Amino acid sequence: MRPVRLSRRALLKGSLAIGAGLTIGFELPVARPRRAMAQTPGVFTPNQWLSIDRDGLVTITNSVPEMGQGSMTTTTIIIADELDADWKHIRVNQAPADPKVYANPVTGSQSYGGSRGVRDHIEMWRKSAAAAREMLMQAAANEWGVSVDQVETEPGVVVHRATGRRLTYGQLVDRAQALPVPQNPKLKTPDKFRYIGKNLHRLDTPEKVTGRGIYGMDVQVPGMLVGLIARPPVVSGAKVKSFDATAAKAVPGVKHVVQVTSGVAVVADRFSAALAGRRALQVSWDLGPLAQLSSEEISREYATLAKQPGQVARHDGDAEKALGAGGRTLEAVYEVPYLEHACMEVMNATAHVLPDSCVVWAPTQNPGGTQATAARITGLPANKVTVNTTLLGGGFGRRGEVDFIVDAVETAKAVGVPVKLMWTREDDMQHGFYRPATYNVFRGALDGNGTPAAWFHRIVGPGILIQKGRAAANSVDPAAVTIARELPYDVPNMQVEWVNKDVGVPVGFWRSVGASQNAFVTESFIDELAHLAGKDPFEYRRALLGKSPRHKAVLEMVAARANWGAPVPAGHGRGIACAFSYGSYAAHVVEASVDAEGRVRVHRIVCVIDCGLAVNPDQVKAQMEGGAVYGLTAALYGQITIANGGVQQSNFDSYPMLRINEMPTVEAHILDSGEAPGGLGEPGVPPVAPALCNAIFALTGKRIRRLPIRPEELKRA
Amino acid sequence: MINLVVNGKPQRVDVSPDQPLLWVIREDLRLTGTKYGCGIALCGACTVHLDGAPIRSCVTPVSAAAGKRVTTIEGLSPQGTHPVQRAWMEVDAPQCGFCQSGQIMSAAALLARKASPTDADIDAAMVGNICRCGTYQRIRAAIHRAAALNKGGAR
């Protein structure tokens, strides 16, 4: 048996009064209640994260959206373990938007990215559950007239050791509710963990193998219409000059045609009617400043700017001097393209706007931002905006944006009835927030032993945080220089510079963000230096990692597990790379071959992750498997190009995904460092592309300095 | 009016004959387990069975299903205990899960045709189903496991 999931279908079918099926009083500001929260009689509710009813059913509220990373299960494991709950007697539901109650305690917001689910919340959740457990123990001790240190818990039960007396959590609900909430509960020592560190099944698998799970696009609201927006042919900056809705309104089923910020919405009684109406709609666009933009122009501008100094992100010693000291030197240029997230579920949201309230149903990583956005558009106070976070059909950073929320709320406000605002795949691919394209100049110098004496790296590209107004315009955007600035290798003279060039293409957080391209370029260039020095790429890195023992440990372990020193199968090449991102250390060894046509086949990936405490090891491995596919897809196929200001790719034919017939064996290993938890959604991505390209070099002698990998460049003459 | 048999139940839908079967399933019959992913038969998220054969419902006009048996993920088994579903649960194949209805329908059709598929059979039958979360390794393992379960296989 698995714990049950509170059915969302029931919740979604109801009226506007829907919360998210909460059993707790989420309107109370409850940073640290002195006494258990006000709630339904017969329910013990020590805080916003859990409640227990008289039947002993534990309800856990998960604040981190479930986008595939397994948050629903991981949150539950952490709370259930510290509570000593019976795993078979738990249900979990998704928190509503209410940042005062549910915000991530580290970021202070109810927006989830950066692989922060476990690492930012675990301490708070454990304390919350430990407090509840202490209250249940105290309630039982009071009942038996014994001291609380004579009682202990088994899953769902308080036990008096000396007499064998037992009271279930359900029997203690009313007594526990009357007790003060302990402010400094004692946490379990790791040897007492009952669920953490075990391989537990995901709670969401049953609903995901039966079609019962409700994603954003599955939401059904009585009286709902379906909208699609006619969007401009350019990626950003266009405005509607005028539109003629006559033909669109003549399409059977089309009910409304309204202008919104991102274009013109066609609202119909079904998807196909909205699509036909959109096709019939005549829109005249002011294409704006990007109308002439092309990828070729962007590359040329980047190359020109790369000749000029940038802002200094890191400066150790004197790289210029060391480069001119007469040792062996190497110069290289690396380029990476824009990438789109391509969540399997296209962007969408459903909204109903009434004069005094608004309800949004959305597959969002950003419930707090969704609420704030809807409040801004409707003019309602935030507490009149209810946000129901559905399952997410992929997130990868795309769903932290609120553009699709704006679409839905503006359209629903304009037409007065509930609207499910859908995107097509083409909309999704051509109106995204892309992983930035960057241009990188490297110069390296070796000393007499072949050790790097100088490392110069200049990056040209946009700053995601700066574009979004979340970092000062003249600052060094951390997302642009991450990994590059923190290069872990011992190099006495190091210069890392960044030239901020934002051409206006909307950029965003793409699974592992700056680490995705900066690990590729730095882990490729260190490999170049190793080969220049005539040294083994693994041993070369290892010797330079004296100041970063956790990098070194994952690298050594992956080399051992991949049998690094042993001969590679005939016709295969083997490459290695490592990277720290989002709190975790990862190292990968990739084995690949290249056929006569230059097509790359990846056979095997061995990876090691040091994520500190691994809450659910099987799902840690699942994230590494998934990260490998995400990284390979980008390395082999991923590129978004711009022509006439528009994205040239439109669907999975022009933006291909890795498929099952190309799937290598992925062997994921966990290095148990005993450290605090790190992230997992992202750290499995960055080392993949460089390890693959290093393997291709080992096999062919051809260095991939421009992604994606182009078969024509690897074709045998 | 078009007559269909969906998950064993006769249905009459009042839609134009060129309406994609996907949207009839999702919007008229309110069976949302079948997903829209690409709209042009590139991703497999909309896979259902038509008289037992896997098809992409996003490019199949509803008229092509008239009088035929349509099976969606909701109708694969009454309790979600089809061997493919059990195997999927054993290995925890899904991550975000959005593509998995289509994956499962493709896999179930493969196993109905071939009791013990090889890896090459799996590649050929499943190549049309994209999983952006990258669960392919577990999908492969789950198909082999389902084949074993089908034979009343070892626990």
Image: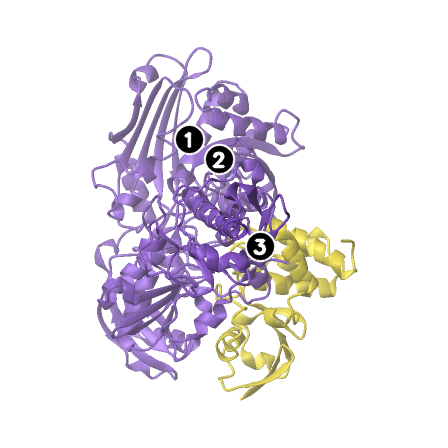
Chain colours: A purple, B yellow
Mark 3 element type: strand
Front residue of A636/A101: it is: A101
Residue at screen point 40% across, 38% down: A515
Labels 1 & 2 near each other (Cβ < 8 A):
yes
Q: Of discs 2 and 3, which sits in the foreground?
A: 3
Task: Name the residue beneath numbered marker 1.
Answer: A522
The disc labelled 3 sits on which kind of residue?
Answer: Leu
The disc labelled 1 sits on which kind of residue?
Answer: Thr
Mark before the other along the chain sequence, 2 or 3 = 3
Residues tagged by mark 1 and mark 2 found on one chain of the structure: yes
The disc labelled 2 sits on which kind of residue?
Answer: Pro
- Residue A29: image quadrant is bottom left
Chain bearing mark 2: A
Q: Tell me the CA gap for discs 2 and 3.
A: 57 Å
Whether residue A624 sits left or right of residue A62 in the image: it is right
What quarter of the picture does the C terminus of chain A occupy?
Answer: top right
Residue at screen point 61% across, 27% down: A560
Mark before the other along the chain sequence, 1 or 2 = 1
Q: Of discs 1 and 3, which sits in the foreground?
A: 3
Whether residue A284 sits left or right of residue A125 in the image: it is left
Residue A462 disc label = none
Task: Name the residue beneath numbered marker 3.
Answer: A167
Front residue of A456/A147: it is: A147
Whole-percent x, y for residue A60 in the image: 48, 56
Label 3 CA crowd tier, 10 Å (few <14, some 14–19, many 20+): many
Residue A690 disc label = 2
Residues tagged by mark 1 and mark 3 found on one chain of the structure: yes
Front residue of A184/A346: it is: A184
**Residue A179 in view of the camera:** yes
Label 2 CA crowd tier, 10 Å (few <14, some 14–19, many 20+): many
Q: Tell me the CA gap for discs 1 and 3.
A: 59 Å
Chain bearing mark 1: A
